[in-house]
């Protein structure tokens, strides 16, 4: 989904109004959509004692209008009482905001305040932040700074409308910004929400449709790209009723060591949970007795390791035999970043099948950058070509990726996916001669590595980045601090591998898995208590949210 600037969003809204969608109607759609998302989120995330009443905070301008629509709709769909605390009397609003404020049901109390009274901050209150929107310029003026400080100090759940109040919609900056648990943005996501300063203030991010024409959106100026459910839904079509397990691919997970026995099993279970038909786990022979397969459906194979408990040179030949039967491979989680891993890694890269290189495999790859030259572009002995648009430099544009016209016909795209966390990313940048990007923004780092290696890059962290050769970059809207737990990256690697085995191209598999992984974490009963072992099972619920064909 496109990220847009404030100027681009205003242009789209003006175009919708010219096409016959009134400002009042767009505001109605925005408020109703936000109320329904807020009610669903709060009902799922918080226990009854933490959801006793709604306090809707209304400022001025269109954000206030959204808040009044939200309050009215919550009163219809939620059993909880609703009250509005406004900084501006409804009669002083204008346009669509005044239209909706004047149509508030009389049973919903509206109190005009200069600061939030104690009744707005009682335990069990859910705060809806409709104070300031995209029209903010500079620091918030009174009374917004005081109210923002009260909201942040309260520790109460917060749902922000369009963006957290006080945030610059274009940059994500702001010295006095509400910290939200859920941000419901209207029409299209604003680019500031996904900046490195803005993203941590947003909590979960959702987007509601307000009546923008699809053709106008397609032609609108883009400030980047973000992953939402709508973007990955096409990657999970209805499964053929007559299909059998071989139709959904065979994933090989080559991972683990005597020191790290859980990583390969987390990745393997995740591969199955994403719909892969068959998963084989190849583990070092001496480490096998220490490992427990979480699912009886997993096939576990021991690989000779010289009795050391980790992959070595003698592991390469038996690994090649297993690779011959697989449609995709995940290599590296928990394997140990030692020199003995080199020959098995080389066997994986030479196998000619889609591969996810993760964890310790990445650290060894950084020592042998020459191994990846052309590997990310080859399948079955064929290569894709990187062709520079002869006009791109003249127009000040970056190089464009032009795929070999025959490769798409055979379903071929870049087949390697690298999944570093920030520390591994630094090692890769240095290993591939990209040390000048160490202090660059995360998206620029991922793009540089993808273009240099011909591989898709998944740079994990808050707002995980997915980059592909040729400059395609997107940032994930799902996920959060719940994923800051040991083993969550192993699960992500298995999800990507499971989708690769089902014949999704690397770029699509990486994006789908990254969003699914983040959404699964959002569906956990508790962010604080989530462990990686929970994620494969939560994937079932996440798939149901994404598509009815799950």
Image (spheres, rainbow, N blue to C red):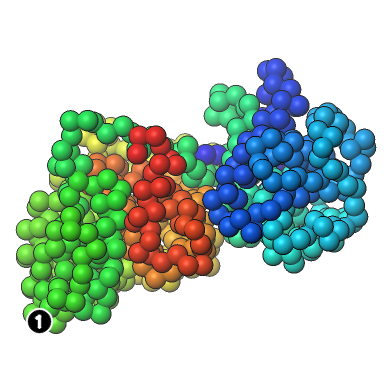
398 relative position to 240: left or right: right
Q: Position of residue 516 (x, y in %)?
A: 41, 49
Query: Is 444 located above or below residue 366 in the figure?
Result: above
Query: Is 45 located above or below residue 7 in the figure?
Result: below
176 relative position to 535: left or right: right
Q: Which residue is located at x 25 percent, y 51 percent?
A: 272
163 relative position to 220: left or right: right
Task: Give the crowd class for mark 1: few <14, some 14-19, many >=20 residues within 10 Å.
Answer: few
Q: Pick the residue in front: 533 or 78.
A: 78
Q: Position of residue 479 (x, y in %)?
A: 49, 55
Q: Is residue 533 visible?
A: yes
Q: Position of residue 255 (x, y in %)?
A: 22, 67
Q: Pick the residue in front: 268 or 471.
A: 268
Q: Is residue 406 visible?
A: no
Position of the C terminus, as image quadrant, is top left
The image shows a total of numbered marks equal to 1
Q: Which residue is located at x 14 percent, y 58 percent?
A: 299
Q: Position of residue 381 (x, y in %)?
A: 15, 46
Q: Which residue is located at x 92 percent, y 41 percent?
A: 89
The residue to which callout 1 is attached is 307
Q: Which type of secondary structure does the marked residue at label 1 adopt?
A: loop
């Amino acid at each position: 989904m496109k990220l847009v600037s404030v100027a681009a969003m205003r242009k789209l809204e003006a175009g919708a109004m010219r096409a016959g969608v009134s400002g009042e109607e767009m505001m109605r759609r925005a408020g109703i959509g936000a109320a329904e998302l807020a009610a669903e989120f709060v009902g799922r995330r918080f226990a009854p004692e933490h959801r006793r009443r709604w306090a809707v905070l209304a400022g001025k301008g269109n954000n206030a209008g959204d808040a009044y629509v939200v309050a009215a709709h919550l009163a219809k769909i939620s059993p909880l009482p609703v009250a509005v605390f406004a900084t501006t009397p409804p009669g002083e609003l204008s346009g669509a905001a005044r239209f909706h404020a004047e149509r508030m049901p009389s049973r919903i109390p509206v109190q005009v305040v200069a600061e939030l009274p104690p009744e707005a901050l009682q335990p069990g209150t859910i705060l809806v932040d409709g104070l300031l929107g995209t029209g903010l310029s500079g620091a918030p003026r009174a009374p917004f700074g005081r109210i923002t400080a009260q909201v942040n100090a309260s520790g109460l759940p917060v749902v922000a409308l369009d963006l957290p109040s006080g945030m610059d919609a274009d940059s994500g900056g702001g010295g006095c910004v509400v910290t939200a648990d859920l941000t419901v943005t209207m029409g299209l996501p604003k680019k500031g929400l996904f900046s490195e300063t803005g993203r941590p203030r947003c909590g979960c991010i959702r987007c509601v449709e307000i009546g923008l024409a699809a053709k106008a959106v397609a032609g609108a100026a883009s400030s980047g790209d973000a992953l939402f459910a709508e973007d990955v839904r096409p990657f999970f079509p209805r499964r053929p009723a007559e299909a059998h397990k071989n139709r959904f691919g065979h994933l090989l997970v080559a991972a683990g060591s005597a020191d790290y026995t859980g990583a390969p099993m987390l990745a393997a279970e995740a591969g199955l949970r994403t719909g892969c038909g068959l998963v084989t786990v190849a583990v070092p022979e001496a480490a096998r007795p220490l490992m427990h397969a979480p699912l009886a459906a997993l096939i576990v194979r021991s690989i000779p390791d010289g009795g050391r408990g980790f992959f070595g040179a003698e592991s390469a030949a038996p690994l090649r035999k297993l690779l011959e039967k697989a449609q995709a491979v995940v290599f590296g989680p928990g394997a140990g970043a030692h020199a003995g891993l080199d020959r098995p890694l080389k066997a994986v890269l030479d196998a000619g099948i889609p591969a996810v290189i993760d964890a310790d495999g990445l650290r060894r790859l950084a020592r042998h950058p020459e191994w990846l030259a052309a590997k990310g572009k080859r399948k079955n002995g064929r290569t894709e070509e990187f062709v520079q648009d002869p006009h791109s430099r003249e127009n000040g544009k970056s190089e464009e990726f032009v795929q070999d016209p025959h490769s798409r016909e055979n379903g071929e795209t870049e087949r390697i996916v690298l999944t570093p966390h920030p520390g591994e990313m630094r090692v890769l940048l240095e290993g591939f001669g990209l040390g000048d990007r160490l202090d660059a923004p995360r998206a620029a780092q991922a793009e540089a590595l993808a273009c240099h290696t011909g591989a898709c890059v998944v740079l994990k962290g808050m707002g995980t980045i997915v980059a592909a050769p040729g400059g395609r970059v997107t940032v994930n809207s799902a996920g959060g601090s719940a994923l800051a737990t040991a083993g969550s990256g192993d699960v992500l690697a298995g999800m990507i591998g499971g989708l690769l085995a089902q014949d999704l191209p690397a770029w699509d598999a990486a994006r789908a898995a990254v969003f699914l992984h983040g959404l699964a974490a959002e569906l956990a009963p508790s962010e604080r208590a989530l462990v990686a072992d929970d994620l494969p099972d939560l994937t079932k619920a996440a798939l149901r949210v994404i598509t009815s064909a799950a």
